Image (cartoon, helix red, strand yellow):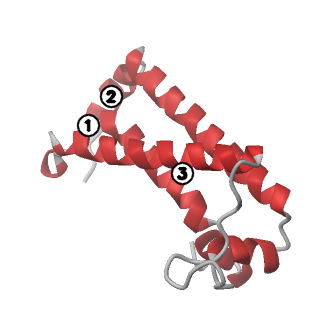
């Protein structure tokens, strides 16, 4: 998508928002993929349980942390992992200074992102629990992809 978006938009999505937002989105995606049957050459069998466990641990930690930040029990983690709290190049520092976000915007956005991922995972699990994926699977097996 780099050829379709402006440099400022790329800076926002990949640099500023992608760090903490990716923690939610990637862990939720990893848990949602638990039920997806991959093609034969990409079978992941027992490995999917390990991926699910690691993604669940990451998601739960991030969700609890941003819930505490939202309620004011924790501070927003400014700075970077490598250079510490005083580094002005951290993801959340970029949101605050380069993008002009307020602290309450940061708190609300990441807490809402966690809740959105939680709802999306609930929807995925409901689809597979109710076996609503089976009609789509039958439809797709009749198509030949080359």
C-alpha separation, residue under disc 2 versus residue under disc 1: 10 Å
Q: How many numbered marks are there?
A: 3
Residue at image coords 75%, 53%: 107
Q: Which residue is mark 3?
A: 24
Are circles 2 and 1 on residues that touch, CB within 8 Å?
A: yes
Q: Specify which label sits upstream in the sequence, 2 or 3.
A: 3
Q: Quadrant of the C terminus?
A: bottom left
Could you tell me which secondary element the residue under label 1 belongs to? loop
Are circles 2 and 3 on residues that touch, CB within 8 Å?
A: no
Res 137 visible: yes
C-alpha separation, residue under disc 2 versus residue under disc 3: 28 Å
Q: Which residue is mark 1?
A: 37
Closer to us: 80 or 8: 80
Q: 70 left or right of 145?
A: right
Residue at image coords 71%, 80%: 6
Q: Specify which label sits upstream in the sequence, 3 or 1.
A: 3
Residue at image coords 49%, 42%: 60
| Quadrant assignment, res 137 | top left
Is residue 7 depicted above or below 61 in this figure? Answer: below
Closer to us: 95 or 63: 63
Q: 2 left or right of 142?
A: right
Q: Which residue is mark 2?
A: 137
C-alpha separation, residue under disc 3 versus residue under disc 1: 23 Å
């Amino acid at each position: 998508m780099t050829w379709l978006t402006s440099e400022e938009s790329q800076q926002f999505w990949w640099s500023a928002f992608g760090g903490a937002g990716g923690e939610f989105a990637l862990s939720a995606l990893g848990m949602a993929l638990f039920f997806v049957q991959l093609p034969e050459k990409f079978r992941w069998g027992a490995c999917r349980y390990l991926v699910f466990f690691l993604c669940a641990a990451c998601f739960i930690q991030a969700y609890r942390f941003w819930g505490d930040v939202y309620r004011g029990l924790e501070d927003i983690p400014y700075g970077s992992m490598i250079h510490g709290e005083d580094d002005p190049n951290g993801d959340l520092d970029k949101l605050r200074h380069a993008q002009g976000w307020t602290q309450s915007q940061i708190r609300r956005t990441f807490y809402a992102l966690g809740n959105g991922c939680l709802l999306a995972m609930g929807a995925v699990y409901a689809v597979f629990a109710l076996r609503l994926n089976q009609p789509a699977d039958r439809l797709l097996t009749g198509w030949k992809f080359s």
